[in-house]
């Protein structure tokens, strides 16, 4: 019998790979494949870029290793699953969320998936390869992927991968926004704009958007802020006091991630009010306890858990939240490097969310 030797060539796909601060490339990498029996592999059909990806590229998130595929948001179709996956099936159209959940640990049992101790939490595009690729391996598929109802577009669902649950949970729910409240939102990027949309669901008295960029304030108006302040020109604390009979905002939501905006939020809030911090901070901020101790202020912080994703999915499917309006620019998946330029230059390009699609 004749012996035939076959050279097995490793299959390759394209992905956006991080190569240390300031360096990334759209290049060939080995195909994503099932490794653990709870994994699924998803063909990425729409994917977006997060402000956090820009932080990683600047070198602000040193845990991200050279060679890591970036991205933690996607919508796609399941192509394969491990033997232990029970509810997700090949062919399912799914949302890949920024947070994965083992489903079993103490924090997952409480719905605090962001704090998962069993290997979940924020891992995609951070500790393991992410979604800015033709295919992505998603751990804990049954407890981390969300099947998508019919009648909703990929783009709308994609906004549920990060910005909508983040602003809703860490901003609006942590800040306990209630009917009639004056809500001051500092930062009108995708997270702040999304906080405006979700704060509106609670019939606030005023939503005041505060930003340094006029283009962002224009967007804030169209997302439902009834008042806007450019704090480069106007004293935001004075402005909010005038609107609230000298008291201050009931809720101040921090959606930037730098010390001055956190400190501003603690000045904007009324006695007994709430400061909900969403921003990812790289530097210490000053907590002015010498003036705050007497004011009964509540300050909350948090990484998104995505416990609200099923609720938000229903609201998006019922068109109660117009999620597609975040998308300002569209690209083919192979044009992702250009998409990064447009997203990083938001002040000039007016980008809010950029979406890349694979036909
Ligand atoms: N906690 C979480 O789980 C979580 C999840 C996702 C994102 N985030 C964080 O939320 C923050 C906002 O995200 P984004 O994508 O909207 O960011 P972004 O950079 O797109 O937007 C920030 C906005 O803040 C404005 N700004 C900057 N400095 C300001 C100042 N001094 N005063 C007023 N406005 C100012 C900018 O003009 C911009 O419009 C980031 O820190 C991001 O990392 C947190
Ligand atoms: Zn993100
Ligand atoms: Zn867990």
Image (cartoon, rainbow, N blue to C red):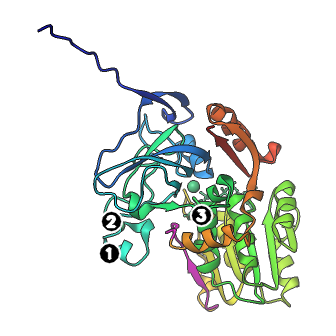
**Nearest to N terminus: mark 3 or mark 1:** 1
Residue reaching furthest front? 1
Residue 27 horizontal/vertical position (percent): 51, 27
Q: Do the residues labelled 2 and 1 touch (CB within 8 Å)?
A: yes
Left or right: residue 28 versus residue 261 is left
In the image, 93 versus 106, the foreground residue is 93
* Cα–Cα span, label 2 and label 3: 30 Å
Where disc 3 sits, the SS reads: loop
Magenta residue span: 295-306
Q: How crowded is mark 3: few (under 14 residues within 10 Å), some or many (20 or more)?
A: few
Disc 2: residue Cβ within 8 A of ligand 3's nearest atom: yes
Count of picture labels = 3
Q: In which quarter of the image is residue 193?
A: bottom right
Q: Is residue 214 above or below residue 4?
A: below
Disc 1: residue Cβ within 8 A of ligand 3's nearest atom: yes
Q: Quadrant of ligand 2?
A: bottom right
**Which residue is the site of mark 3?**
149
Kindly identify which numbered label has been placed on residue 291.
Answer: none
Mark 3 against mark 1, which lies toward the viewer? 3
Q: Which residue is drawn at 59% across and 75% down?
A: 311
Visible in this render: residue 341? Answer: yes
Q: Residues within 10 Å of mark 2 (few under 14, many from 20)?
A: some
**Which residue is the site of mark 2?**
117
Work out which quarter of the rendered image holds the C terminus and state it.
Answer: top right
**Nearest to N terminus: mark 2 or mark 3:** 2
Residue reaching furthest left? 1
Where disc 2 sits, the SS reads: loop
Kindly identify which numbered label has been placed on residue 106.
Answer: 1
Q: Are marks 3 and 1 in contact (CB under 8 Å)?
A: no
* Cα–Cα span, label 2 and label 1: 8 Å
Visible in this render: residue 232? Answer: no
């Amino acid at each position: 019998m004749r012996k035939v030797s076959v050279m097995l060539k490793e299959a390759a796909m394209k992905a956006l790979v991080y190569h240390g601060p300031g360096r990334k490339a759209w290049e060939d990498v080995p195909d994503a494949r099932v490794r653990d029996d709870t994994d699924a592999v998803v063909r990425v059909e729409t994917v977006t870029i997060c402000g956090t990806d820009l932080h990683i590229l600047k070198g602000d998130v040193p845990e991200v290793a050279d060679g890591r595929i970036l991205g933690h948001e996607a919508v796609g179709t399941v192509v394969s699953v491990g033997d232990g996956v029970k509810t997700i099936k090949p062919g399912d159209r799914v949302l890949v969320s920024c947070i994965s959940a083992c489903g079993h640990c103490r924090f997952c049992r409480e719905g605090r998936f962001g704090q998962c101790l069993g290997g979940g939490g924020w891992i995609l595009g951070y500790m393991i390869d992410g979604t800015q690729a033709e295919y992505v391996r998603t751990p804990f598929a049954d407890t981390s992927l969300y099947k998508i109802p019919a009648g909703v577009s990929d783009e709308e669902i994609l906004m549920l991968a990060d910005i909508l649950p983040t602003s809703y949970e860490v901003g609006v729910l942590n800040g306990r926004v209630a009917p009639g409240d004056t809500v001051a939102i500092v930062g009108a990027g995708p997270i702040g704009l999304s906080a405006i949309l979700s704060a509106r669901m609670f019939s606030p008295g005023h939503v005041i958007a505060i930003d340094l960029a006029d283009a962002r304030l224009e967007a804030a108006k169209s997302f439902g802020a009834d008042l806007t302040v450019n704090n480069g020109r106007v004293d935001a604390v004075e402005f909010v006091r005038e609107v609230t009979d000298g008291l201050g905002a009931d809720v101040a939501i921090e959606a930037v991630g730098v010390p001055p905006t956190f400190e501003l939020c603690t000045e904007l809030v009324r006695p007994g009010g709430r400061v909900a911090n969403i921003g990812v901070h790289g530097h210490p901020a000053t907590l002015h306890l010498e003036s705050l101790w007497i004011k009964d202020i509540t300050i909350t912080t948090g990484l998104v858990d995505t416990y609200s994703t099923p609720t938000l999915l229903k609201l998006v499917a019922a068109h109660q939240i117009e999620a597609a309006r975040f998308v300002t620019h569209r690209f083919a998946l192979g044009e992702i490097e250009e998409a990064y330029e447009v997203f990083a230059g938001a002040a000039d390009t007016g980008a809010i969310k950029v979406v890349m699609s694979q036909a």
